[in-house]
Image (tube, rainbow, N blue to C red):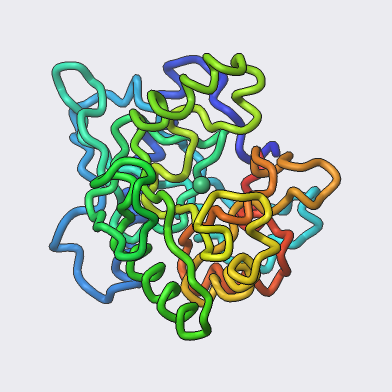
Amino acid sequence: MARYKKKSGSLGAVALIVLAAMVLSSVIGVALGNSETGKTPSGTPANTVEPSGTPSGNTVEPGGNEPGGSDPQNGGEQTDKPSSPKETALSRQDFTIDPATGLAKEIKVVDDNYMLLVNRTHPLAQMYKPDDMVTVKYTVSGVGVKGETDQLRKVAAEAFESMVEAAAAQEINIKMRTGYRSYEYQRDRLYNPEVKNKGEAEANKSTAKPGQSEHQTGLALDVGGESQKYALSYEFGETKEGKWVAEHCHEFGFIIRYVDGTKKEPGKLTGYVFEPWHIRYIGVEAATEMHQHGGSLTYEEYLGILD
Ligand SMILES: [Zn+2]
């Protein structure tokens, strides 16, 4: 899509764009914060960019500040949506620039940014780590790393726990297998071993490169159901637990993130084949809106960010 061009210009031009985008997103961030909370921006500032720092070397996406326009390939579907989800989905990081190096020394999660898009073309930086994570109550023991992959950002953890309890009331038992995965976990425990086993080309088909997994957001998790002993399974979608999750997860703010496996070109839009177990928190309003489109709309299509 032409609207979201990849960075291919000179470094100087990119640096200028990034700087302008950061200033703009700062303004937009404060404005959004006011309208949503009704509070004055006297608390924590939305952005902590030091004016003297140079932004060169940062990997922030400058998108999301461009004026809206019709995208013929979306068939006009996006025109009746507000532009804010796209802006929210792409303006995701706060920077503190180290004046000595000119590089970002700290990246904080924007507190209310639960719609951020992370995929193969929109990765997270290595230092991106949510600062509001809590341990989830209902997890499968012996999976992942205790104190890390059993965690989610608070809003997602609470939503998931509510979902588990609502399911249990209908005699549907589900648990989280893994939630948060750090950049280092993705690199050392998942991606590098896959490359070693299968080679890079094969590994890339099923495994995210470090930074490309939305598990790093702390808003995504894998679910298992009792009837399959809480294992990770492509058949999860056919079980009573998988069907319940597909039908009800939006009520708690979740979507099944990788849904295009049933289309002609599996994984073309999301970068992954159908994963009935992987759910992602985006908030009740957006998740419900997506649910109303049926089960095949991808998050990329919903946001209109297809590059
Ligand atoms: Zn997953």
Residue farthest along the bottom direction in this orientation? 169
Numbered label tally: 0
Residue 293: percent from the left, percent from the top? 71, 69
- Quarter occupied by the C terminus: top right
Q: Residue at x 41, y 78 (%)?
A: 165
Residue farthest along the right direction in this orientation? 264
Q: Residue at x 34, y 46 (%)?
A: 149
Residue 115: percent from the left, percent from the top? 46, 57
Q: Nearer the viewer, residue 149 or 64?
A: 149
User: Could one spot residue 301 in this view of the protein?
Assistant: no
Image height of 221 relative to 196, above or below: below
Q: Within the image, what quadrant is residue 216 found in?
A: top left
Q: Is residue 87 left or right of residue 15?
A: right
User: Could one spot residue 66 in this view of the protein?
Assistant: yes
- Quarter occupied by the N terminus: top right
Q: Nearer the viewer, residue 177 or 45?
A: 177
Q: Residue at x 39, y 47 (%)?
A: 217
Q: Is residue 76 left or right of residue 60?
A: right
Residue 268: percent from the left, percent from the top? 73, 39
Residue 284: percent from the left, percent from the top? 49, 73
Q: Within the image, what quadrant is residue 94 found in?
A: top left
Q: Within the image, what quadrant is residue 256 found in?
A: bottom right
Q: Residue at x 50, y 27 (%)?
A: 209
Q: Is residue 47 left or right of residue 197?
A: left
Q: Nearer the viewer, residue 94 or 168?
A: 168
Q: Is residue 257 left or right of residue 27?
A: right
